[in-house]
Image: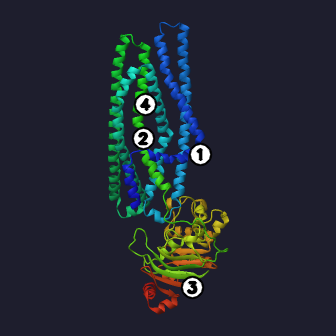
């Protein structure tokens, strides 16, 4: 978190648009579109700059030229306007298409990066913040690529071309115009720096409110059950008002900058027009030349005014680009080796922990595991028991390499987990978490998540083994029933059975069960236990359970307390030792008898 805080501080001090360079790699594959848009841009700017010349010809030759010649001038103006319309439409199409394509690529790049990040990464950033960068920030950058950059470049061309033609038309008046340029540039630079800092702060406030809303909406039932709605509304309201207050400052700064620039620009134009009018009266300048000069001056002034507004947009986009690049370039705490080793074929499922010590990044002062060592033989069923927070679930987290231990070694079939590719490692495990994750899709696809290439018949067979087939068949559309976001249409026990069916379908060498039957009634638990026993045959199984009745038949029981192993043996042996396990057994089985 300190690293991200320092990065945010560095961003606040930045005063350039350099972060926009990070968009280069995303633009490079579409060079053809960029070149096409650039050519259309140059052509339309050039055509716009020729119109004042036609106007001068018409005015100065109004009485001197013949009627056919006058008609030719007007026809030429209409032709230029037609070409300008076609060029502008082509530029709009190419630039907008380019923007949509690039932003689609950026969104994919961000998602591809963050979806593979380990839980250690998400201890430093909330998912709502990630979603904000994936949506709000990319939308900002889209407006820049698809519009602002094109408009900015067009106005730069209009500014440069207009100044050149101003000099050609009247060097004297042009020099007078340039005297006012520093007066215009100064507020752009001064207020622009402040605007960029406010833009960054505004995006941060929006991200904070998105993160809070995401967390609250995912826990809506808990909030309502604890009558926490008012507090939640107040908290979100404060964040929203903070975002609004920051946005007001940004808007005010931009409005002030725009007002100052427009006033200074048009004051300069009026002054120059006054001097030009005197030159016309003195016959040192033709009326057509003055009109041509005024049109160019208006075009140049409009370009400067537009650039002052676009400057703010570009600065906002620069801040948004920084935030996106942070995610794309973020380093996962889990470092994957460039030369992974191969597991034996077939994988037998031998697991080894040797003097493993681990502290969660959010709780560095507390050891979740402290010098833990144990071995699990292939095909063995081992239960991990102990009080909450004793370190049982941490064993699963480390086996799946969501975190790495601070010291010690963890092996699978004799190969250190650090030496394996993450995909190769995790494909050897099928897991059922304590809180099953159900996706907003059909029951069939939720189970098939365990093995995407499974047939419908294989999915149904897994559901039968997990005692899920009966309730799924009774759903409105059977296996094709949409179960809602996070499975809201299913009960807790039904969710666990779907998750268990998913693990059964995965058919991996190692099975991890974290309180897999905690939400089941007695009848369903018995059916699932039988399914687990069948599934455990021939594969290594690790079971976490607080209800000791579910682990009595395990080949081996490892007892954890405060991150250490305090006992190891089968049920009868541990009861006879009269330690922690025996006390837990007496409490549970005595309560059950009563």
For residue 202, above or below residue 410: above
Instruction: Residue 170 in the image: state x and y as whole percent.
Output: 42, 19
Regarding residue 212, the answer to whether it shows in the image is no
Residue at label 3? 555
Label 1 environment density (alpha carbons within 10 Å; few <14, some 14–19, many ≥20): few
Identify the secondary structure beneath mark 4.
Answer: helix
Residue at label 4? 303
Identify the secondary structure beneath mark 2.
Answer: helix
Label 4 environment density (alpha carbons within 10 Å; few <14, some 14–19, many ≥20): many
Give the side of residue 347 with respect to residue 209, left or right: right
What's the distance in space between the residues labelled 3 and 1, CA to CA?
A: 58 Å
For residue 262, above or below residue 593: above
Identify the secondary structure beneath mark 3.
Answer: loop
The label number, if any, that marks residue 133 in the structure image: none
Residue at label 1? 29
Closest to the observer: 381 or 16? 16
Residue at label 2? 313
What's the distance in space between the residues labelled 2 and 1, CA to CA?
A: 25 Å
What residue lies at 41% left-to-right and 24% top-to-bottom? 297
Q: Earlier in the sequence, mark 4 or mark 2?
A: 4
Label 3 environment density (alpha carbons within 10 Å; few <14, some 14–19, many ≥20): some
- Of badges 3 and 2, nearer the viewer stands 2
Q: Earlier in the sequence, mark 3 or mark 4?
A: 4
Give the position of the C terminus as an image quadrant. Answer: bottom left
Regarding residue 211, the answer to whether it shows in the image is yes
What's the distance in space between the residues labelled 4 and 2, CA to CA?
A: 15 Å
Instruction: Residue 287 in the image: state x and y as whole percent.
Output: 41, 13
């Amino acid at each position: 978190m300190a690293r991200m805080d320092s990065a945010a501080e560095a961003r606040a001090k930045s005063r350039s648009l350099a972060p926009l360079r990070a968009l280069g790699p995303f633009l490079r594959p579409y060079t053809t579109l960029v070149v096409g848009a650039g050519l259309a841009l140059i052509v339309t700017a050039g055509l716009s700059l020729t119109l004042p010349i036609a106007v001068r010809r018409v005015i100065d030759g109004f009485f001197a030229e013949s009627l056919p010649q006058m008609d030719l001038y007007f026809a030429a103006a209409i032709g230029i306007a037609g070409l300008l319309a076609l060029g502008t439409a082509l530029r709009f199409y190419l630039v907008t298409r380019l923007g949509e394509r690039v932003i689609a690529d950026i969104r994919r790049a961000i998602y591809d990066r963050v979806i593979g990040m380990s839980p250690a990464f998400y201890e430093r950033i909330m998912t709502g913040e990630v979603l904000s960068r994936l949506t709000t920030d990319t939308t900002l950058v889209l407006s820049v690529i698809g519009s602002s950059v094109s408009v900015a470049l067009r106005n730069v061309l209009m500014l440069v071309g207009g100044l050149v033609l101003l000099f050609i038309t009247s060097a004297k008046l042009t020099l007078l115009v340039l005297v006012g340029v520093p007066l215009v540039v100064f507020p752009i630079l001064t207020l622009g720096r402040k605007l960029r800092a406010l833009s960054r702060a505004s995006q941060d406030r929006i991200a904070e409110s998105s993160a809070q809303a995401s967390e609250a909406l995912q826990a809506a039932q808990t909030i309502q059950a604890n009558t926490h709605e008012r507090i939640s509304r107040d908290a979100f309201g404060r964040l929203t008002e903070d975002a609004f207050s920051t946005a007001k400052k940004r808007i005010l700064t931009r409005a002030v900058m725009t007002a100052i620039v427009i006033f200074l620009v048009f004051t300069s134009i009026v002054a120059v027009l006054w001097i030009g009018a005197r030159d016309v009266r003195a016959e040192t300048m033709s009326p057509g030349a003055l009109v041509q000069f005024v049109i160019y001056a208006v075009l140049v002034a409009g370009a400067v005014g537009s650039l002052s507004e676009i400057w703010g947009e570009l600065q906002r986009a620069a801040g948004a680009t920084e935030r996106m690049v942070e995610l794309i370039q973020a380093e996962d705490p889990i470092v994957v080796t460039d030369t992974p080793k191969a597991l034996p074929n077939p994988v037998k499922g031998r697991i080894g922990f040797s003097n493993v010590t681990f502290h969660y990044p959010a709780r560095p002062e507390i050891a979740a595991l402290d010098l833990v060592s144990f071995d699990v033989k292939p095909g063995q069923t081992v239960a991990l028991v102990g009080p909450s927070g004793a370190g049982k679930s941490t064993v699963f987290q480390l086996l799946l390499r969501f975190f790495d231990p601070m010291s010690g070694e963890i092996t699978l079939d004799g190969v250190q987990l650090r030496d394996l590719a993450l995909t190769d490692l995790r494909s050897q495990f099928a897991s059922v978490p304590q809180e099953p994750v159900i996706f907003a899709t059909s029951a069939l696809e939720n189970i098939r998540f365990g093995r995407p290439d499974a047939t419908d018949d294989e999915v149904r067979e897994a559901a039968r083994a997990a005692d899920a087939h009966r309730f799924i068949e009774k759903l409105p559309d059977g296996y094709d029933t949409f179960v809602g976001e996070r499975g809201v249409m299913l009960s807790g026990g039904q969710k666990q059975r779907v998750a268990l069916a998913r693990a059964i379908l995965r058919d991996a060498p190692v099975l991890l069960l974290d309180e897999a039957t905690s939400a089941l009634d007695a009848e369903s638990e018995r059916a699932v236990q039988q399914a687990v026993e069948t599934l455990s045959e021939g594969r290594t199984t690790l079971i976490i359970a607080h209800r000791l009745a579910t682990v009595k038949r395990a080949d081996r029981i490892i007892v954890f307390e405060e991150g250490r192993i305090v006992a190891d043996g089968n049920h009868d042996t541990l009861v006879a030792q009269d330690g922690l396990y025996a006390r837990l057994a007496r409490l549970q089985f005595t309560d059950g008898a009563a």
